[in-house]
Image (spheres, rainbow, N blue to C red):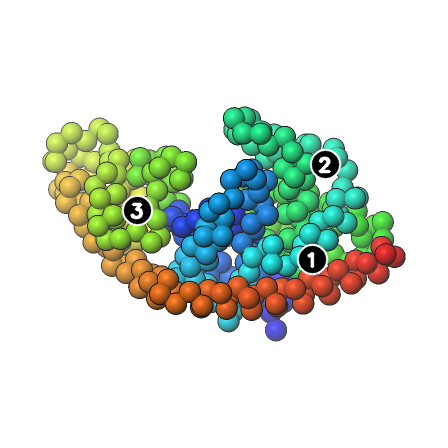
């Protein structure tokens, strides 16, 4: 019997990149062995900032789930489903929105930040203001008591805890107060040295072909102070070395650092070796992805079964909520 319940989700933005794999997915894969896990494609959340463009939403959902499973999420160990396939999320979101003070939402730091960052988009909407309540719903409806997040998401977890406390105080103690689960993850920069992001166009997809990986690695930014092949290098400022830290063995990385710092290996040779290592590591994932693309019914079954299991849990929670609220 697994003692804790974990919930986490991703917005469906299509195929994922290596930063997503190393940042979230590798941790999810570990968590599925030790916790009861609900991993959700939060398609309603995608509408909070992209409601006007939904043409690719269904395909984005499929491509993202294919990445999840090809990297190692196992539907026999965890629940994988789409948020909108479990309508109980909508009912609990409505009920929790009735008791959530407006001031709690307006003070949310990510709300203010995104309004500034996305000032060219019309997101002054009820849905965008209230998305933290929807996020709280996603967590509380499965009575998740552990939520794997980065430090920047802590305000959302605290708001979820406040909403749970307020409900339990006003009615009956139904919800646990979830705790953030801070897990270590390996950070991969983009090929230009900035954070890997689709908006920067500096990413490498999990599904990238060997040729694409070779090409992207060639484009990687290296030590700007290193002009000639035998100049001493500074690995810690080099994007290529950051990838070695993630994809190669520790002993090999230590040896590479020494060679670079002594100017005994050039950047071209270093990149060729990295591309070969990455392609070797990614090949089993590519094969699994190809299998899933060739057999679309596999993903359909995973999402159907995941939604059925999720609905049972969600409905049990809603029965408690309705009884507590006397409705």
Choose the circle earlier in sequence order: 3 or 1: 1
- Marks 3/2: CA–CA distance: 40 Å
Mark 2, Cα crowd under 10 Å, few <14 / some 14-19 / many 20+, is some
Residue 55 percent across, percent down from the top left: 48, 45
Residue 61 percent across, percent down from the top left: 48, 53
Residue identifier under label 3: 243
Mark 1, Cα crowd under 10 Å, few <14 / some 14-19 / many 20+, is many
Residue identifier under label 1: 88
| Quadrant in which the C terminus is drawn | bottom right
How many marks on residues? 3
Residue in the image at 40% along x and 39% along y: 197
Choose the circle earlier in sequence order: 1 or 2: 1
- Marks 3/1: CA–CA distance: 42 Å
| Quadrant in which the N terminus is drawn | bottom right
Residue identifier under label 2: 104
Taking depth in this image into account, of 67 and 126 the one nearest to the observer is 126
- Answer left or right for 123 relative to 15: right
- Marks 1/2: CA–CA distance: 23 Å
Mark 1 element type: helix
Residue 38 percent across, percent down from the top left: 58, 61
Taking depth in this image into account, of 111 and 157 the one nearest to the observer is 111
Dividing the picture into quadrants, the one containing residue 322 is bottom right
Residue in the image at 69% along x and 57% along y: 88
For residue 325, above or below residue 189: below
Residue in the image at 88% along x and 57% along y: 326
């Amino acid at each position: 019997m697994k003692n804790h319940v974990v919930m986490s989700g991703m917005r469906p933005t299509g195929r994922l990149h290596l930063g997503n794999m190393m940042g979230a997915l590798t941790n999810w894969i570990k968590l599925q062995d030790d916790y009861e896990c609900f991993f959700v494609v939060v398609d309603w959340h995608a509408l909070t900032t992209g409601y006007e463009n939904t043409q690719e939403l269904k395909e984005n959902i499929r491509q993202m789930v294919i990445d999840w499973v090809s990297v190692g999420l196992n539907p026999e160990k965890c629940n994988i489903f789409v948020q909108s396939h479990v309508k109980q999320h909508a009912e609990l979101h409505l009920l929790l929105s009735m008791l959530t003070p407006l001031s709690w939402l307006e003070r949310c730091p990510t709300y203010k930040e995104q309004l500034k960052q996305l000032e060219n988009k019309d997101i002054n909407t009820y849905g965008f203001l209230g998305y933290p309540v929807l996020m709280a719903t996603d967590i509380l409806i499965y009575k998740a008591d552990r939520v794997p997040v980065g430090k920047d998401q802590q305000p959302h977890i605290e708001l979820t805890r406040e909403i749970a406390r307020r409900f339990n105080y006003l009615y009956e103690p139904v919800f646990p107060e979830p705790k953030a689960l801070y897990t270590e993850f390996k950070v991969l920069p983009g090929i230009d040295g900035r954070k890997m992001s689709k908006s920067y166009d500096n990413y490498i997809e999990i599904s990238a072909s060997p040729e694409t990986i070779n090409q992207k690695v060639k484009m990687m930014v290296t030590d700007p102070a290193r002009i000639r092949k035998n100049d001493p290098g500074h690995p810690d400022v080099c994007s290529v070395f950051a990838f070695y830290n993630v994809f190669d063995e520790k002993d090999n990385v230590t040896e590479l650092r020494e060679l670079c710092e002594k100017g005994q290996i050039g950047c071209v040779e270093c990149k060729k070796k990295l591309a070969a290592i990455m392609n070797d590591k990614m090949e089993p994932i590519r094969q699994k992805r190809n299998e899933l693309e060739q057999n679309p019914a596999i993903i359909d079954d995973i999402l159907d079964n995941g939604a059925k299991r999720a609905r049972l849990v969600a409905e049990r929670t809603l029965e408690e909520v309705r009884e507590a609220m006397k409705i």
